[in-house]
Amino acid sequence: MERKEIAGLSFISATLNEAVDEALRLILTGKGGMVVTPNAEIGKLAIDDPDFRALLSSADLVVPDGAGVVLAGKLLGAGLKGKIAGIDLGLALLPRLAEHDLPLFLLGSKPGVADAAAEKLCGQVPGLTICGTQHGYFKEDEEIVARIRESGAKALFCCLGAPKQEQWMNAHRAELPGVLMLGLGGTLDVVAGNVKRAPDFFIKCNLEWFYRLLKEPRRIGRMMKLPAYELDVLLLKLGLKKLKGREG
Ligand code: UDP
């Protein structure tokens, strides 16, 4: 799978279908692993925090979730095939999981949301097995890890928000061998119908971020990370900024 380096992260340059094939391959070969879906906000965090960057870099697939990352690729002349929203990757994987009898566990969001999402998904994807759900406001990790392992899950949607979900997946990947964990942010909220995704027009025009800003103006602080990310990418390209190493 082709990869392009953007500000210290090696993003896949792929179509949605190619990314789904690769994710499925990781499961069918028994490798499992970790899929992260950084957008510009997370990309900025990775620039500023070398430990978090190393964590993201250790993922099996680093998926460019968001127009901001695609723009950064253009600024660097390292064009990506396109944006792959984490939610699109997760949803497109479902029929393939069903086809191969691979059970899915849903982790994250407020109590009740994962159950509602499970019901919706099972109604939409014939043959899909959801082998467990768990809300994202638990205290003890170990009990949850044991439940996921015992459920026989081969895929896990880890929807705890960034950077918590990435840290959680990294902390427990060794205890969940063969499970493909995908960090998918607010996906369960959207599937359950609690949060609406932008209309197609906004998605097609790479303006999904703008729609979310209109709906949730309090996200402005988080969204200002987008221009900060693009600026850093330019400064890195021009040699006016260097990525900090892990020792500082
Ligand atoms: N969340 C969670 N546990 C936590 C913090 C957050 O399960 O301790 C969930 C939250 O309920 C929401 C998701 O993580 O469903 C984060 O959503 P957000 O839209 O912030 O994620 P994004 O896709 O923007 O990263």
Image (cartoon, helix red, strand yellow):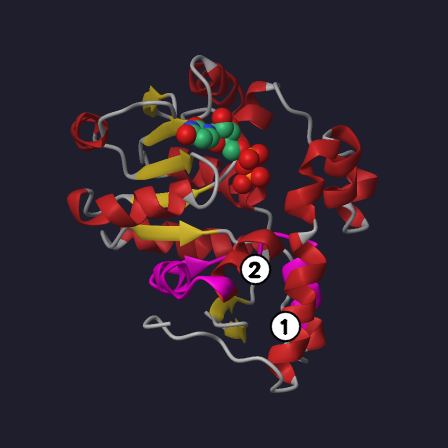
- Closer to the camera in the image, 134 or 219: 219
Find residue 76 and report its image quarter.
bottom right
Find residue 219 and report its image quarter.
top right
Q: Earlier in the sequence, mark 2 or mark 1?
A: 2
Judged by its main secondary structure, the magenta piece is helix
**Residue 186 can be seen, yes or no:** no
Q: Which mark is residue 44?
A: 2
Which residue is drawn at the image coordinates 19% and 47% (left, top)? 177
- Residue 248, given in percent of the width and then of the height, sits at 37, 72
Does residue 123 sit above or below 196 in this rendering? above
Residue under pointer 1: 233
**Magenta-drawn stretch contains 62:** yes
- Closer to the camera in the image, 158 or 180: 158
**Left or right placement of residue 83 versus residue 6 in this view:** right
Which residue is drawn at the image coordinates 71% and 75% (left, top)? 75
Q: Amino acid at mark 1?
A: Val
**Magenta-drawn stretch contains 64:** yes
